[in-house]
Amino acid sequence: MLEPNTLYIVPTPIGNLSDISQRALDTLQNADLIACEDTRHTARLLNHYDINAKTTSLHDHNETQRTQWLLEKLSQGQSIALVSDAGTPLISDPGYVLVKTCRQAGINVIALPGPCALTTALSASGLPTDSFSFFGFLPVKQQAKAEMLQRSVRKGHTSVFYEAPRRIKDTLSVCVSCFDFEHEVVLAKELSKTFETYVSGTAQDVLDWLEADSVHEKGEFVLMIYALPANSEEAFSEEVISLLANLKSELPLKKAAAIVAQHYSVKKNALYKYGLAHFD
Ligand code: SAM
């Protein structure tokens, strides 16, 4: 049973249809109305789960006007569900105007926990999660993008961005020009889908991976950047340092650090940085 006069924020799968919760399905089944970013897109999900429900659209171009109409229905006692095409509504998706207006009008708003590319990518990235920020999509123009990246990435902090396939290579090139090896970059691709992939390293490593095969830049991406704290230095075992020192006499430091890092499963960037500080 749903509560009357209530707006339900309902997350939907970001790839794997099984990721929808039972509570989300019950809410969609029992809502008087579902406000969808795209009614045709949501119809596929509803059909899959055999849910017959009344839907209406709420997207970036009609949100203000549609909000007043939905507010009237909520005030009359209806339970309304809000969904976007994928993931959690309002997270780089429509819904902010509606939720803000409901809150101001004293309408009950209940958010269901569920799929979101941001938290999914971050939790498996291997980057620190104790201090992070999410910035949604980066600006399209190169200069604005570079400025935004430089403003948003802070030492000792993980910054998370969404990126479109047609821009991912350009964004990594801008990262290469903005950041050095003191940044760890993780690119999460196609989360919860067949070709789910995490690529990590320097911005240049990730760009090299994208450029290695045109298939690599197809799909949906979450880009995460961790800037090492100033003067931070990882502690490495004597074995690691000694092998690095030996290889360094034969190979460029970058190559030597990559080999040792792989052999001992330690961070390549941090080892390279250690080498620069101690051997060069
Ligand atoms: N509301 C959604 C959420 O909760 O994650 C995000 C919607 S936003 C319009 C779409 C962007 O989210 C994509 O361009 C991509 O950056 C990211 N995204 C969505 N699904 C993804 C997936 N399965 N794998 C990686 N990134 C994804």
Image (cartoon, rainbow, N blue to C red):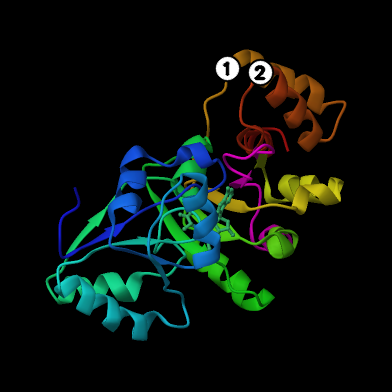
Residue at image point 28% right, 81% down: 69
**Residue tagged 2:** 264
Residue at image point 34% right, 71% down: 96
In the rendered image, which quarter contains the C terminus?
A: top right
Question: Which mark is on residue 199?
Answer: none
- Residue 93 image offset from top left, x and y in percent: 45, 66
- Height in image: 149 above or below 25? below
Disc 1 on helix, strand or loop? loop
Q: Residue furthest top?
A: 239
Q: Residue furthest bottom?
A: 65
**Residue sitting nearer the eye, 154 or 241:** 154
Q: Amino acid at mark 1?
A: Ser
Residue at image point 85% right, 46% down: 212
**Residue sitting nearer the eye, 135 or 278:** 135
User: Assess mark 1: CB under 8 A from ligand 1?
Assistant: no
Q: Quadrant of ligand 1?
A: bottom right
**Residue tagged 1:** 237
- Height in image: 256 above or below 55? above
Magenta-drawn segment: 173-197
- Residue 266 image offset from top left, x and y in percent: 61, 25
Query: Does 143 appear in magenta?
Result: no
Asked if one can make out residue 156 in the rendered structure from this viewpoint, the answer is no
Disc 2 on helix, strand or loop? helix
**Residue sitting nearer the eye, 5 or 261:** 5
Query: Does 194 appear in magenta?
Result: yes
Q: Earlier in the sequence, mark 1 or mark 2?
A: 1
- Residue 114 image offset from top left, x and y in percent: 38, 45
Foreground label between 1 and 2: 2
Relative placement, left or right, of 174 versus 115 is right
- Which quarter of the figure has residue 5? bottom left
Tag 1–tag 2 contact (CB < 8 Å): yes
